[in-house]
Amino acid sequence: MLEKDPKQRITIEKLKEHPWLNENRTPLNKETPETITVSDEEVKKSLHFFLSTQIAKKCGIIWKLKSLKNRELIKEIKEIKENHHDNEQ
């Protein structure tokens, strides 16, 4: 797979048959009758984690926007200060 030369590289067909990739694999055409039971507590924890990461992302976006606004504000203040200084001379 990592071989640079395409002529030496393993083909997709051979790769699909390679034991290293098929060691614990369930064949795709075989149905898996297992069902997984998840408790309400596990669902709550997952939702809590998901929502907290979404809130963190939103806070990060808000912080970036405020940071951009602060940079723009600082730039405007510097321009006003420069203009004021130029007008005094």
Image (cartoon, rainbow, N blue to C red):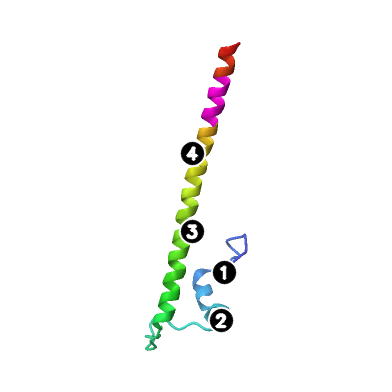
Q: Which residue corresponds to mark 3?
A: 56
Q: Which structural element holds mark 2?
A: helix
Determine if the magenta segment contains residue 76: yes
Residue 84 higher or lower than 54, as above or below: above
Mostly what secondary structure, the magenta segment? helix
On residue 19, the disc is 2
Q: CA distance from mark 1 to mark 3?
A: 43 Å
Which residue extends farthest top?
89
Residue 4 higher or lower than 87, as above or below: below
Amino acid on which disc 2 is placed:
Pro
Q: Earlier in the sequence, mark 1 or mark 2?
A: 1
Circle 3 packing at 10 Å, graded few (<14), some (14-19), many (20+), is few
Q: Earlier in the sequence, mark 4 or mark 3?
A: 3
On residue 69, the disc is 4
Q: Which residue corresponds to mark 1?
A: 10
Q: Residue at x 45, y 55 (%)?
A: 58
Q: Can you give x and y, in whole percent of width and height, for residue 87 in the image? A: 56, 13
